[in-house]
Image: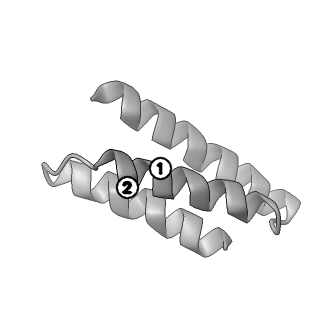
Amino acid sequence: MFQQARNAVMNMMQGNNNGNNPSQADKQAAQNAIQAAYNEATPQEKQELQQLEQQLRQHNQLQ
């Protein structure tokens, strides 16, 4: 679950760097993946998930 959340955020951000704006569904899917991963995450993974969420928030504010 952790890796899926990480991949979802990275793919979304990479797409935006290539000039593609992620859809609302993509944003929601990334957020859902992060939330689901929290349930099974180790303390270190939870810290990384928080960083991913922060990146997601910053990314959303730029649009």
Helix or strand or loop: what does disc 2 sit on? Answer: helix
Looking at the picture, tell me which residue is in the foreground, 33 or 62. 33
Q: Could you tell me residue 48's position as x and y percent?
A: 68, 54
- Report the side of 24 relative to 52 (left or right): left
Vertical placement of residue 13 versus 56, above or below: below
| Residue at which label 1 appears | 28
Q: Which mark is residue 42?
A: none
- Residue 45, quarter of the rendered image: bottom right
10 Å crowding of disc 2: few (<14), some (14-19), many (20+): some
Which quadrant holds the N terminus? bottom right
Three-letter code, disc 2 = Asp
Q: Which residue is pictured at 66% across the width and 69% down the height?
A: 2
Which quadrant holds the C terminus? top left
Contact (CB < 8 A) between labels 1 and 2? yes
Q: Residue furthest front?
A: 25
Q: Residue furthest right?
A: 43
Spatial CA distance of label 1 from label 2 is 5 Å
| Residue at which label 2 appears | 26
Q: Which residue is pictured at 49% across the width and 34% down the height?
A: 57
Looking at the picture, tell me which residue is in the foreground, 1 or 48. 1
Q: Which residue is pictured at 48% across the width and 42% down the height?
A: 56
- Report the side of 54 relative to 8 (left or right): right
Q: Could you tell me residue 42's position as x and y percent?
A: 85, 65
Q: Residue furthest top?
A: 61
Looking at the picture, tell me which residue is in the foreground, 28 or 59. 28
